[in-house]
Amino acid sequence: MDITAKMVKELREKTGAGMMDCKKALQETDGDIDKAMDFLREKGVAKAAKKANRVAAEGLTHIEIDNNSAVLLEVNCETDFVTKNDQFKQLLSELGKHIVKQKPETVEEALQQDLHGEGENVEKYLNSIVATIGEKISLRRFTLLNKTDNDAFGAYLHMGGSIGVLTLLEGTTDGDIAKDIAMHAAAVSPRYVSRDAVSEEEVSRERELLKTQALNEGKPENIVEKMVEGRLGKFFEEICLLEQNFVKDPDQKVKNYVADKGASVKTFVRYEVGEGMEKREDNFAEEVASQMKK
């Protein structure tokens, strides 16, 4: 298939590899982005395994806690100017309070629920805000967590809500400890709580990639397996919360920090505004020129 400049650009942004390396990888894998990323890693060309999606859309995250229930949600808009609007901030609060009380299972269900008991559903309320502000605004996603009286929620919003993290710890009611873990997750961006949460399929795939990479480096086969296991440990440190060095005390792992407090991490949710979404790429100079012509 034809390899377009857009495909090369996307692969380059995801891997940090050079343009010609990206083009060759796409040619070798018939334009499959995921396979091309694996190809580059096997050749030792791509930068380390983080495949962070581009963060493009505007908006904010918000956390609402009500006794033993808590919600982390994300609301998107078109420009960052709107996020500073008091009406937009009030919207976040209203949605948070509604979701934590009514506990819908999906965004679609939430939108159809009665908001204030006056016959206006959430979708109509959103549309009224859109009409007032003049931008498209949408409730993108939310996650509800429930705890017992012996657990603790940790809430942290970075930069006013560009990143939001909600944690749930067992064995402690100390919200400060849970917030410490939330701040860590905001900074380091783990994908799983522990090694056990990583699927065997993902581990096997990573093991094969590391083996191919080591062989391509010219390492003797008799030491490749030991090298792979060592590098696999680094892989877990990158993606698993409990395996990471604690940001407030890098000399200990997160799992040691919480264990010393008699606690354990049950789960966490991390939202970064716009992750995985695309935003139109406007040429600002052309836009200004166009407005001047009008």
Image (cartoon, helix red, strand yellow):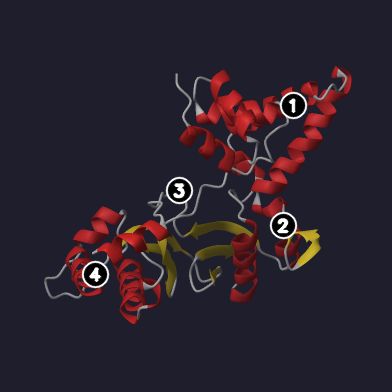
Q: Residue at label 4?
A: 134
Q: Position of residue 152 (x, y in %)?
A: 56, 70
In the displayed structure image, the side of residue 152 where residue 128 appears, left or right? left
N-terminal of the pair, mark 4 or mark 1, is 4
In this rendering, position of residue 244 left or right of residue 222:
left
Mark whose residue sits in front, 4 or 1: 4
Residue that carries the numbered disc 3 in the rendered image = 276
* Marks 4, 2: nearer the viewer: 4
Q: CA distance from mark 4 to mark 3?
A: 24 Å
Mark 4, mark 3: which one is toward the viewer?
4
Q: Dot 3: within a 10 Å radius of its alpha carbon, few (fewer than 14), some, or many (20 or more) residues?
A: few
Cα separation between marks 4 and 2: 47 Å
Ranked by sequence position, the earlier of labels 2 and 1 is 1
User: SS of the residue at dot 1?
Assistant: helix
- C-alpha gap between disc 4 and disc 1: 52 Å
| Residue ID for mark 1 | 213
* Quadrant where the C terminus is found in the figure: bottom left
The label on residue 255 is: 2
**First reached walking from the N terminus: tag 3 or tag 1:** 1
Give, as a three-letter code, the residue at label 1: Gln
Determine the secondary structure under disc 2. helix
Tell me if residue 1 comes above or below residue 267 in the rendering: above
**Residue at 50%, 26% in the rendered image:** 32
Three-letter code, disc 4: Gly
The mark nearer the N terminus, 4 or 3, is 4
State which quadrant residue 286 falls in. Answer: bottom left
